[in-house]
Image (spheres, rainbow, N blue to C red):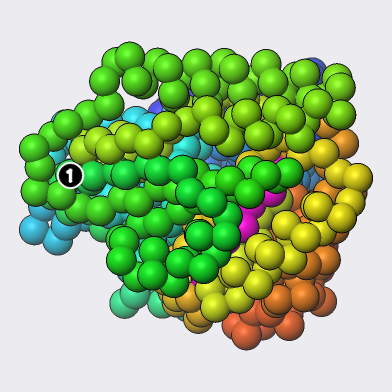
Amino acid sequence: MSTGNSGSDTTNARQARTRNEPWRNWAGNVAARPVREVTPASVEELSTAVRAAADDGLKVKAVGTGHSFTAAAATDGVLIRPQLLTGIRNIDRDAGTVTVEAGTPLKRLNLALAREGLSLTNMGDIMEQTVSGATSTGTHGTGRESASISAQIKGLELVTADGTVLTCSEKENPALFAAARIGLGALGVITAITFAVEPIFLLTAREEPMTFDRVASDFDALYAENEHFEFYWFPHTGNCNTKRNNRSAGPEAPVSRFSSFLEDEFLSNGLFQAVNSLGRAVPSTIPSIAKISSRALSARTYTDIPYKVFTSPRRVRFVEMEYAVPRAALVETLRELKTMVERSNLRISFPVEVRTAPADDITLSTASGRESAYIAVHMYKGTPYQAYFTAAERIFTAHEGRPHWGKVHTRDAGYFSTVYPRFGEFTELRDRLDPDRLFANDYLRRVIGD
């Protein structure tokens, strides 16, 4: 772990830098102007910064890489940047765990674990986020039995509102552990996370175009037959791209350099950027573009280590809403979304992404206590998205949907208290740990109350 000399001039400068420009998130739809930034290089420095903010009457928020589409990390007080709190603290091969500093990007963690012959069991489709940012908002991939990144946490260390450093696990502070694995930044500033890991393994990915009607009719079988199943539906078409990931004995057969360039860079990023720019400028072209785009990617099969299969480069910027609905309600919900788009004047250039997760025991997880399916809708950055998202959200909430904490939604604490049976547990814990709401902001006031 990095250490710092808390009394030095260097540390003071590092801990309190006045910010002149607004902070913006990755998508550019959220901005904030904190009074100052703090970049602590140790847990002790972070505790000092939290206490100093409280003494100055300022709120505190930690921010990762800004990949959330909500204002979860926005503040007009003190912005904590954890980029000096990075790296692996400890690997325990007997316990099957790794403890990592909170500011470590998932990409660096995946690379480091691979060098050690280890891997997370499941992960999302991008790995630019910090481990603390990704877990605090419930980042997930897709899986029949393997759940979100947060569900792979075995222990947490965090600084609370009075500057105290707390640790928690299933046995130590279990109520805090149940809540803080997806804590929304409301319970404290995470400083380290212990993840369950396993010996590195191979996955065989099978990507295949499929019609919407076939995916809808065969969804239960596709879900049951594959460890990880997901698909993308292209609005204005009856076409989907499906992806099935399953463990493999090998041999390793990675995507060729040419295929990687053609499909993952040129088609999925370069050309996709161009057609979205055209669609934004001339919306009437979008249905025709969608028909071409939905047929651009061909079937392919490859075998590689987990992070090279689960994750993909995402260079085209967008705004996203994602809801978790009960898995049994997925097909009906998706058909309603498709009907809504077809009957509207909306022009949607981004595919709709569908994934699944098993039930977990995290207090405010979108999969808490129920098997879930995720439906994510996107709009290209700079394109008006409110009409589409509003219509989609109306459908999702009719099925008791739970929005992803880091993606656009309009729900509030009143709604969440009806769809999360353990909502009260979280707010009671927050009352004990942060009675003066040091870690509050406008987003938290809306989603968990004040």
Query: In the displayed structure, would residue 66 be above or below residue 328?
Result: above
Q: Which residue is mark 1?
A: 202
> Helix or strand or loop: what does disc 1 sit on?
strand
Picture coordinates of residue 285, whole percent (x, y): 81, 26
> At 8% from the left edge and 58% from the top edge, which residue is drawn?
94
Residue 283, image x, y percentages: 86, 28
The reply to whether residue 363 is visible in this rendering is: no
Is 294 magenta? The answer is no
The C terminus, quarter of image: bottom right
The three-letter amino acid code for the residue at tag 1 is Leu
Whether 375 is among the magenta residues is yes
Q: Would you identify the image quadrant in which residue 36 lies?
A: top right
**For the N terminus, which image quadrant?**
top left
Task: Name the residue at 50% across, 59% down.
Answer: 215
Taking 18 as reference, is 344 above or below it? below
51 and 157: which is toward the camera: 157
Describe residue 382's horizontal placement relative to residue 302 as left or right: right
Q: Residues within 10 Å of mark 1 (few under 14, many from 20)?
A: many
Q: Position of residue 367 (x, y in %)?
A: 52, 71
- The residue lying toward the viewer, choosing from 131 and 292, is 292
Tell me if 312 is positioned left or right of 293 in this view. left
Residue shown at the point (40%, 56%) measured from the top left: 229
Q: Is residue 408 visible?
A: yes
Quadrant in the picture for residue 196: bottom left
Q: Which range is magenta?
A: 372-378
Q: Main secondary structure of the magenta part?
A: strand
- Foreground residue among 172 and 32: 32
State the residue in front, 54 or 205.
205
Which residue appears at 23% of the width and 44% of the height? Answer: 204
How far from the left and from the top, in percent, is residue 79? 67, 36
